[in-house]
Image (spheres, grey):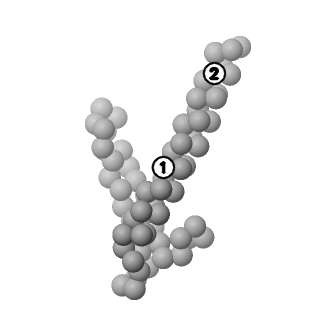
């Protein structure tokens, strides 16, 4: 991964739309990786992407309502 070379996989899934929890999975490249900084970086990156997607969706809704 270009964003964090120690991370092999980072992802999440929403268990169910009616539940307010997610399953977060992070897989590092090896034993020498610092686990907690990798988790923190993964969560921060995920939150950043989620906010970008939310803003884009919200802007689209506002534009659609204006038409």
Would you name the residue on which mark 2 appears? 62
Quarter of the image with the N terminus in it: bottom right
Would you name the residue on which mark 1 appears? 47
Work out how far the residue at label 2 is from the one at label 1, CA to CA, in angstroms: 22 Å
Position of residue 66 relative to residue 3, above or below, is above
| First along the sequence among labels 2 and 1 | 1
Mark on residue 10? Answer: none
Residue 21, image quadrant: top left
- Residue at 41 percent across and 80 percent down: it is 33
The residue carrying pointer 2 sits among few (fewer than 14), some (14 to 19) or many (20 or more) residues within 10 Å by Cα, namely: few
Q: Position of residue 65 (x, y in %)?
A: 64, 15
Residue 5, image quadrant: bottom right
Marks 2,1: beta carbons within 8 A:
no
Residue 55, image quadrant: top right
Is any atom of residue 27 visible in this view?
no
User: Along the horizontal axis of the image, is 66 left or right of 21?
Assistant: right
């Amino acid at each position: 991964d270009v964003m964090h070379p120690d991370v092999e996989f980072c992802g999440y899934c929403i268990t169910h739309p009616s539940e307010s929890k997610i399953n977060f999975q992070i897989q590092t490249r090896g034993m020498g990786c610092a686990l907690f900084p990798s988790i923190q970086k993964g969560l921060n990156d995920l939150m950043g992407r989620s906010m970008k997607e939310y803003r884009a969706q919200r802007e689209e809704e506002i534009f659609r309502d204006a038409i």
